[in-house]
Image: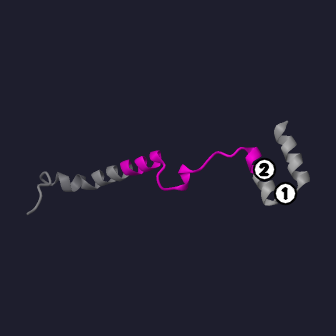
Amino acid sequence: MMHDWGGGWGMILWPFYLVIWLAIIALVIRWTGVGGQGSSRTTSTARDILDERFARGEIDDEEYEKRRRMLES
């Protein structure tokens, strides 16, 4: 048995309803922070980044102190 699609308008408007529902679902996922790296991201300060680079060994003591003083001034 076929469903009543509203005299043809339902068939025409169905893709728009689908897009609207997908957009609503995407917004809910984004707002709740479910499933993604975006939810666990924190804002790093310049000092945090400098500390991380020093801890990884990307910069030496001298460079670290020089840049730290620049950030504090």
The segment highlighted magenta reads 24-51
Helix, strand or loop: magenta stretch: helix
Residue 53 appears at what percent x and percent y? 78, 55
Q: Residue at x 18, y 52 (%)?
A: 9
Residue that carries the numbered disc 1 in the rendered image? 59
* Residue to which mark 2 is pinned: 50
Tell me the quarter of the image containing the C terminus: top right
Q: Are marks 1 and 2 in contact (CB under 8 Å)?
A: yes
Q: Is residue 9 left or right of residue 33?
A: left
Would residue 19 appear left or right of 57 to someone viewing this image? Answer: left
Q: How is the image coloured?
A: one colour
Q: Outermost residue toward the bottom?
A: 1
Residue 10 percent coordinates (x, y)? 19, 53
| Quarter where residue 47 is shown | top right
**Amino acid marked by disc 1:** Ile
Image location of residue 11, percent across then percent down: 20, 56
Q: Is residue 27 left or right of residue 7?
A: right
For this orientation, the residue located farthest to the top is 73
